[in-house]
Amino acid sequence: MQERITWSKDWLSIYESPFSVYDKICYANVITQSEFFKNFGSSMDSSISFLLIRGLDHRKIESKISYPFLTQFYTTITNLSEDFLGYKNQTDDFFNKDLYYCNFCSLNAYHSLFFQFKFIKECPFHLEPLKNNCRVCNQPLIYTFYKSSSISQCCTNCNEPVLLHQHSFPNFKTYTKNEIKSLDVLDLLNMDFEQKQILKGTLFQGIKNMSNKQDLNFVLYCINALRKYYSH
């Protein structure tokens, strides 16, 4: 692999996932997925979130491209999940292990941690229902990084890329909070202290084993209903 890695901080969008970022690195530098793992692989650490892509040395990647990805990744995961955590739940319980994507975002080689959150059913930017099947063969997709000979992550059945780079590289579109159209997601991100305390006291029983997307609007409705009840 080349000594220097091509990367621009302008390619990183808010709430972008490690899956998306590492896919961009491979595509921009014409590095196969297996070569990426060969150079940046590490022992499997089950103590870190699966969202970070286990089996990779993230600090080594940061050092190679001189950009602190991990801080943004951890901040996003925390912002989405911390107020949902009950005494029995772990952070990963609230994120899907199936890979969900927005068809419009994928055309810009973008994947968000929003999409993996179990309480978000549609793309916050496009209000498009999220998909977890290959757009070509309908094979279910998994949130992982396969050690393949491709320079982008592909469906294991038909080799269709999950994220499409050819029309966006090297001028990748960046998404900002101002572009979020989902009122439910904005309400979640902008909860006040009282709403957060009510959410923290809510037990999401069985959430770890739930694979289907859950209804964020209903959760927000219950929080506001409880706040009105407690205020009387």
Image (cartoon, helix red, strand yellow):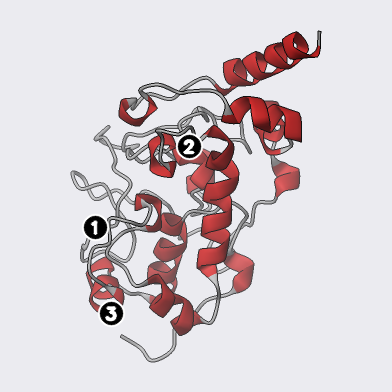
In the rendered image, which residue does mark 1 sit on?
146
Query: Does the image show residue 14?
Result: yes
Query: Left of 190 or right of it: where is 130?
Result: left
Query: Left of 118 or right of it: where is 32?
Result: left
Seen at 64% across and 68% down, the residue is 10
In the rendered image, which residue does mark 3 sit on?
39
The mark found on residue 75 in the picture is: none
The quarter in which the C terminus is drawn is top right
Amino acid type for the residue under numbered disc 3 = Asn
Spot the residue most to the bottom. 3
What is the distance, in whole Å, between disc 1 and disc 3 at their CAs?
14 Å
Amino acid type for the residue under numbered disc 1 = Tyr
What is the distance, in whole Å, between disc 1 and disc 2 at their CAs?
21 Å
In the rendered image, which residue does mark 2 sit on?
117
Element under disc 3: helix
Seen at 44% across and 43% down, the residue is 91
Q: Where is residue 46 in the image (x, y as percent from the top left)?
A: 27, 55
Element under disc 2: loop
Eyeballing the image, is 168 above or below 120? below
Q: Position of residue 21 (x, y in %)?
A: 47, 62
Which of the two discs, 2 and 3, labels the residue nearer the N terminus?
A: 3
Which of the two discs, 1 and 2, labels the residue nearer the N terminus?
A: 2
Eyeballing the image, is 66 above or below 151? below
Mark 1–mark 2 CB contact (< 8 Å) = no
Q: Quadrant of residue 53?
A: bottom left
Seen at 65% across and 25% down, the residue is 198
Amino acid type for the residue under numbered disc 2 = Phe
Mark 2–mark 3 CB contact (< 8 Å) = no
Q: Position of residue 193 (x, y in %)?
A: 74, 35
